[in-house]
Amino acid sequence: MGPVSLDAALSGIFAGSALALWGLRWAKPRRSPGARMAFYLETPRSQLGGAPGGPESPAMAGEALRRVLGPVAGAAVSLASRPLRHGPGANLEISLRQAGLAISVEEYRRQYVRWLSLTPVVLGALGALTGKASFVVLFFVAGLYAGGRRLPERLKALTKRRNEALRSDLPTVAAVLALKIESHKSLIVAVSDLVGQGSGPVVDDLSRSVHLINAGYGETGAFELVAAESAEPAASRFYRFLAAATGGGLDVARALLDQASELRAQRREEVERSAARRTMSLVVPQLVFMAPVLFAFLLAPLPHLLFGK
């Protein structure tokens, strides 16, 4: 067997082992905490008058090692698989809504499995072109990491972009709502009119609250729910203010105008800070690349000035 065939065989063994371990992890999940602690709770249960159930299997040396080292191994596997998890948050549906993705949870998981399955195969095939098993394994592991992080990183980027759009649209939405309320419209009617005429992430959140109200959800509860699901603190405060305004007793138009002015000032300060950071990021490359050239031009005449050469 030539060296190329041996490398191909080793790469196939490593890839098959990785897929087998991954399939075993999914096919045989960890036991519940109650099942894992049942063996240690037999003595307290019998002292309290309960009937001891006995171990499910004989506590041999291998079983003892599994019980002692199992939690450590489980924690290590959980730490190693953290980069491959499918989303940043505990509730994937809320994470998709915060990112503004109009897809279902099932569709997202199908795309995640597709990326996680195809990326290691493609990169492993590229590594096989080099004829070395080490490159195949390296490319395969890199494909697992890249495929597992592709959609979560995209989700984070979309969430960040949507939060910036929320901060930009909030002052305008608050001002428009104030004008509509000044025209002798109630808060819910003004929000419904804005949803029918406007667009953007803030209008999408308000459209969800109007849909909840029309479905029988309470007005205050609908705005509170949208505020709890929002990933932008400024938007959450604005929606909670709308929830409090549904109870009455407030000059809603004046309060909305004040909030619009405050949000506009906060957004202006944020843009100024961002512009200052970008200016500094442009200065650093100039110093790095232009300073050596400038010093070369300044130092070039020194031998002639000093030694007359």
Image (cartoon, rainbow, N blue to C red):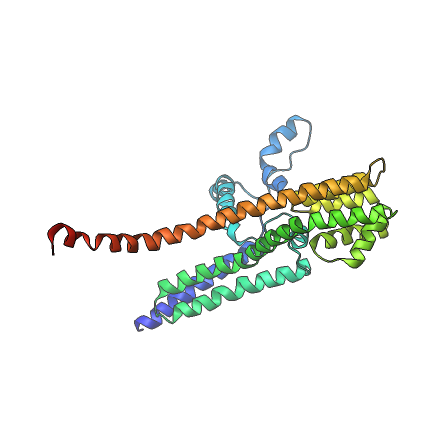
Q: Which x, y percent locates residue 290?
A: 34, 55
Q: Which residue is drawn at 83% across and 45% down?
A: 219
Query: Is residue 232 or residue 42 the one in the foreground?
Result: 232
Where the C terminus falls, by quadrant? Answer: bottom left
Residue situated furthest right in the rendering:
184
Q: Which x, y percent locates residue 36?
A: 59, 40
> Can I make out residue 215 in this image?
no
Query: Is residue 206 or residue 89 the one in the foreground?
Result: 206
Q: Residue at x 85, y 52 (%)?
A: 214
Q: Which residue is drawn at 40% across and 67% down?
A: 127
Q: Determine the image quadrant of residue 161.
A: bottom right
Where the N terminus falls, by quadrant? Answer: bottom left
Q: Residue at x 58, y 34 (%)?
A: 40
Q: In this view, does 74 lie to the left or right of 132?
A: right
Q: Which x, y percent locates residue 294?
A: 29, 54
Query: Is residue 230 or residue 241 the one in the foreground?
Result: 241
Residue 226's place in the image compared with 297, above or below, is: above
Q: How many marks?
A: 0
Q: In this view, does 127 lie to the left or right of 292?
A: right
Query: Is residue 120 or residue 108 the one in the foreground?
Result: 108
> Can I make out residue 37 in this image?
yes
Q: Which x, y percent locates residue 33?
A: 61, 40
Q: Is residue 110 left or right of residue 117?
A: right
Q: Determine the image quadrant of residue 125.
A: bottom left
